[in-house]
Image (tube, grey):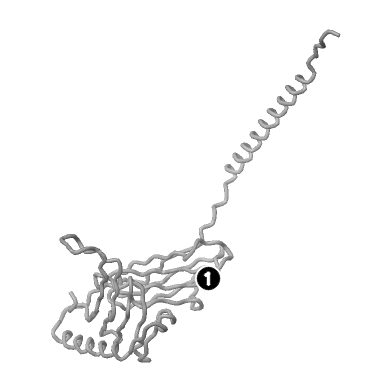
Amino acid sequence: MILNRALILGALALTTVMSTCGGEDIVADHVAAYGAAFYQSYGPSGQFTFEFDGDEELYVDLQRKETVWRLPVFSEFVSFDPQGGLRNMAVLKQNLDILSKLSNSTAANEVPEVTVFPKSPVMLGQPNTLICLVDNIFPPVINITWLSNGHSVTEGVSETNFLNKDDHSFWKTSYLTFLPSADDMYDCKVEHWGLDEPLLKHWEPETPAPMSEVTETVVCALGLAVGLVGIVAGTVFIIQGLRSGAAPRHQGPL
């Protein structure tokens, strides 16, 4: 229920429908949320974004009161006045203040789900990016940090804004550029009200396990056996060839 979450959500959604009209379920090829916004009492803080197919197009920086494009090239094709987003945030704040006075419910906290994976197949010594995907976030107040061998890492770290989901929860992604090494281990640390303690999601490069002495012995024995079989077979063929060449030749009559 929205009231007991001390959060106001607002969205103007545009859905492009490619299926035909009729009794069947509507299937959307693309979904855009223009003006997806929330405002919450904690902080206080909020967010105003344009999204397309789950990816952010822009957001309004509420402190600087300016539009920030996810990719600068987007601003070459369209513009957005940040005052529109700021007005929406003011309305959401006013609605939240009114609803908070009418409600005595406690806040609802969801338990976030965390997954860590590399952007591309890992090759030791080759630059890569670790991705920490945090799903099922509510309320949208969270702290995501990176650890390398137990020590905090800030260089090469970036993250997205909160992205909306159909169930009114959020998801967010944090990135860490790194140089894979067999000696390094990484953790994505997530702090949220839905967790009793900070959650550490561990990741380290997968390196082939060294063979045991028994395995090495078996492999060597198999190699030696194959080699001996080859030698024996080669010797037999050579002997057969020599015998064939030494066979008596019958001469015809003069």
Q: Which of 246 and 131 is in front in this view?
A: 246
Q: How crowded is mark 1: few (under 14 residues within 10 Å), some or many (20 or more)?
A: some
Q: Which of 64 and 42 is in front in this view?
A: 64
Q: Quadrant of residue 195?
A: bottom left
Q: Position of residue 166 (x, y in %)?
A: 25, 70
Quadrant of the snapshot with the N terminus: bottom left
Left or right, residue 207 beside residue 49: right
Q: Residue furthest right?
A: 254
Q: In which quarter of the image is residue 237?
A: top right
Q: Which residue lies furthest to the left in this view?
A: 102
Q: Where is residue 8 in the image (x, y as percent from the top left)?
A: 22, 81
Q: Position of residue 110 (x, y in %)?
A: 27, 71
Secondary structure under tag 1 reads strand
Number of disc labels: 1
* Residue drawn at point x = 60 percent, y = 45 percent: 213
* Residue drawn at point x = 26 percent, y = 65 percent: 18
Left or right, residue 118 beside residue 4: right
Q: Nearer the viewer, residue 17 or 160?
A: 17
Left or right, residue 189 beside residue 12: right
Amino acid type of the residue tagged 1 in the rendering: Phe
* Residue drawn at point x = 47 percent, y = 76 percent: 157
* Residue drawn at point x = 26 percent, y = 87 percent: 89
Q: Position of residue 251 (x, y in %)?
A: 82, 11
Q: Label 1, on which residue?
A: 178
Quadrant of the snapshot with the C terminus: top right
Q: In which quarter of the image is residue 197?
A: bottom left
